[in-house]
Amino acid sequence: GRGLRRAVAVLSALLRESNPPARLAAGFSHSLFIEGEGRLLSCGTTEEDEEGEWEDERPGLLGHGEGVTRLNTPTRLPPLGGKRAVSVSAAARHSLALAADGCVWSW
């Protein structure tokens, strides 16, 4: 769908950079990326799509606070308590990150 096409376009752009993502995950309308140093980035939207697929917004889904509802380019998230991310997962209404020490962060 539309979310997958957007994730592929963003990933293609990131792979051309000097520091491409080490890992990534794509949800319904947002994507998560881990840079080589374990820093997280996200992009996408928390808003209802054109077909009215969502009954409500999903505040905080991008990890940048409830006021951020759209990021067109991957944007670094605040550090996870100084921990390095090693894996990410994204779904329609949540995001998860696994830190190197085994801690799991969700938003």
Image (spheres, helix red, strand yellow):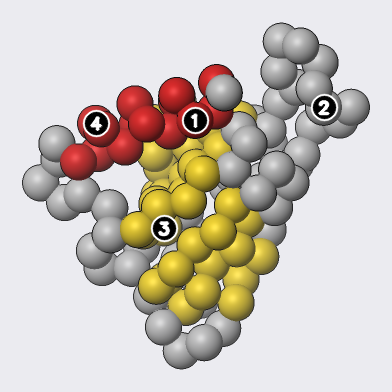
Q: Secondary structure at mark 1?
A: helix
Which disc is residue 54 wearing? 2
Res. 39 visible in picture = yes
Q: Secondary structure at mark 2?
A: loop
Residue contact between numbered discs 2 and 1, judged by CB atoms under 8 Å: no
Which badge, 2 or 1, is on the more N-terminal residue?
1
Q: Residue at x 86, y 30 (%)?
A: 56
Q: Secondary structure at mark 4?
A: helix
**Amino acid type for the residue under numbered disc 2:** Trp
Residue 90: percent from the left, percent from the top? 59, 52
Residue lying at the far front of the rendered structure: 1
- As measured in the structure, the alpha-carbon distance from the residue carrying label 1 to the one carrying label 3 is 19 Å
Q: In front: mark 1 or mark 3?
A: 1
User: Observer-nearest residue: 62 or 20?
Assistant: 20
> How crowded is the residue under tag 2: few (<14 C-alpha within 10 Å), some, or many (20+)?
few
Residue contact between numbered discs 2 and 4, judged by CB atoms under 8 Å: no
Which disc is residue 4 wearing? 1
Q: Quadrant of the C terminus?
A: bottom right
User: Observer-nearest residue: 92 or 75?
Assistant: 92
> How crowded is the residue under tag 4: few (<14 C-alpha within 10 Å), some, or many (20+)?
few
Which badge, 4 or 1, is on the more N-terminal residue?
1
User: Observer-nearest residue: 62 or 33?
Assistant: 33
Q: Residue at x 81, y 15 (%)?
A: 52
Location of residue 30 (image quadrant): top right
Task: Please state the total of marks drawn on the protein image.
Answer: 4
The residue at which mark 4 appears reads as 13
**Amino acid type for the residue under numbered disc 1:** Leu
Q: Residue at x 33, y 68 (%)?
A: 38
Which badge, 3 or 4, is on the more N-terminal residue?
4
Q: In front: mark 2 or mark 3?
A: 2
- As measured in the structure, the alpha-carbon distance from the residue carrying label 3 to the one carrying label 4 is 17 Å
